[in-house]
Every structure is written in structure tokens, then in C-alpha cells.
Amino acid sequence: MRQKKGFLAVVFFIGAYSVFSLKMLAQPGMAATMPVVGYVVLSNGDTLPGKIKWSLKYVENNPVEIKFIADNGNTKLFNASEIKGFGNIIPGWVADDPQFVDQKFQDYVSILSVKKNIPVFMHRLLAGRITILQNRSSGIISNSTTSEKSRIDGIGFTWIPGEGLSIGPRYRTDYRVIEERVRFTSYFVSKENKPILKIEKDNYEENFNFLFGDCQAIVQELTKNPDLKKFKNFMILTEVYNRICQGE
């Protein structure tokens, strides 16, 4: 009887550990070393659903190859020169916020690496006139720091810690998405497909006008809330810029 209880305890532990591991694998920006639900975007723009597993081959700390498992069980290796990108879908967040999946926060897009100009998959955090890509070699700020952000009532948006970012009457991003995006000390940034810049706290101010100075709506937002100009609000301000400055 003791042996049976011991066996059941081991099974329970393994099951709990597996669930925990899968949850960890699904976190934004983390390598999917086990197959996770996702998709690939082919060179012609078609999207194929299935499962994704990283091959753990890197250039400049970015993945260059993935294993795709189709719904029918067929598998294929794709490298960054063959497809436009891929994505992981986080199951828990799918149930909580379907819009989150529509935003494809977990997109990895094929792009030339910053130093060697070799096709790699880079984790895209935001897309628009300003595209922000994760610098996987950057430092990480704890979530406790990012969650301390105070409420911001802008002219065209509202940021509420614990709830999220609302822009205009319809657009909303969950606060968990924002907190995952602002965890890093530096980012790779491209404005309107111009060459990629590495943006961090030390050079943020000198690049600020290049990034946001061409939009009068942002000037008005900064007049109302000067703290928006701080690096800690870079991700929020960029998302607002991409939404309200599309026609300028």
C-alpha cells in the first residue's frame, strides 16, 4: 500500500512539473524546447497552424531554425531564409483575451541580424510605423518594477496598472502584455523600415525626436503628461504613437 501511495505521489509530481514546464515554455520570448501550439507564415503570406519547436540554433542569440509539426503529424524544418516568420500561442491568454492572439504578440519575424546580416527570427513586440523587436541579449527588469507604473489619463488613451492600455473607444491591450514588453533594458527599433537602432535608457533621449517628433498628437500627449517622455513609458508611448499617428 505504501508503494502504491509513493508511486501515485511521483506521478502527481511529474504531472504538476510537466504543467509548470509547459507554462514556462509558453512565456513570451522564451525558447520552445518542447512543441507548443503555434503557426508559421510562409513566404507567400499563407499561415499554417500546427505546433512549433525551436531547433536551438542561434545567430546573435536569435533562433535561425524551427521544427514545424502540422495538424496531420507531418514535420518540416524551416530556417529564417525560407519563411516570413512563426509564432507561439499562449493557451491561458487565449481564453482570457482573444484579442491578444489577434495581435500576434508572439510573432517571430524573419529579418537580417544586426551585426552579421544573416536571416534570423526576431521576436516582434510591437508592429506599426515604429516596430520594436526584442533584444534577447538585453538585461531583464523584474515584473515588480514594471507593475509599479501609475495610472496615466492621456488625451487619446488611458493606462491603468492591473487593467491595461486603452486607445480610443475600441483598442485595448491587457496589462500583462504591457508588463512583458517593458521587462527589458534595451530593444531593437526600426521606424518605417529604416535601419535598426538599439534603443536603451542611455540613448533614448537623443533619439526621442526622431521616433516621436513628427506627430502633433504625441506633442499634445507629452504636454499633458510630461512623464510619458521617460524610458519606462517607451513601450506605452510607442503603442499610442502607432495607433493615433498612422496618417501623419
Image: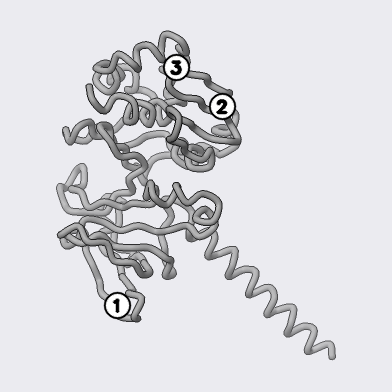
Extreme-top residue of the structure: 223
Residue 247's place in the image compared with 138, above or below, is: above
Residue 73's place in the image compared with 48, above or below, is: below
Q: Residues within 10 Å of mark 3 (few under 14, many from 20)?
A: some
**Disc nearer the start of the sequence (1/3):** 1
**Disc nearer the start of the sequence (2/3):** 2
- The answer to whether residue 228 is left or right of residue 20 is left
Q: Position of residue 62 (x, y in %)?
A: 30, 53
* Rendered residue at 32%/74% (across/down): 70
- The answer to whether residue 68 is left or right of residue 161 is left
* Residue linked to disc 2: 149
Residue 243's place in the image compared with 94, above or below, is: above
- The answer to whether residue 96 is left or right of residue 102 is right
* Residue linked to disc 3: 155
Residue 124's place in the image compared with 69, above or below, is: above
Q: Position of residue 244 (x, y in %)?
A: 33, 25
The quarter of the picture where the C terminus appears is top left
The mark lying in front, picked from 2 and 3, is 3
Q: Residues within 10 Å of mark 1 (few under 14, many from 20)?
A: some
Contact check, label 2 and label 3, Cβ < 8 Å: no
Task: From the viewer's side, name the closer residue of 74 and 24.
Answer: 74
Task: From the viewer's side, name the closer residue of 117 and 240.
Answer: 240
Provide the secondary structure element on which disc 3 rests.
Answer: loop
Q: Residues within 10 Å of mark 2 (few under 14, many from 20)?
A: some
**Disc nearer the start of the sequence (1/2):** 1
Q: Position of residue 19 (x, y in %)?
A: 59, 67
Q: Quadrant of residue 129?
A: top left
Q: Quadrant of residue 188?
A: top left
Under mark 3, the amino acid is Ile
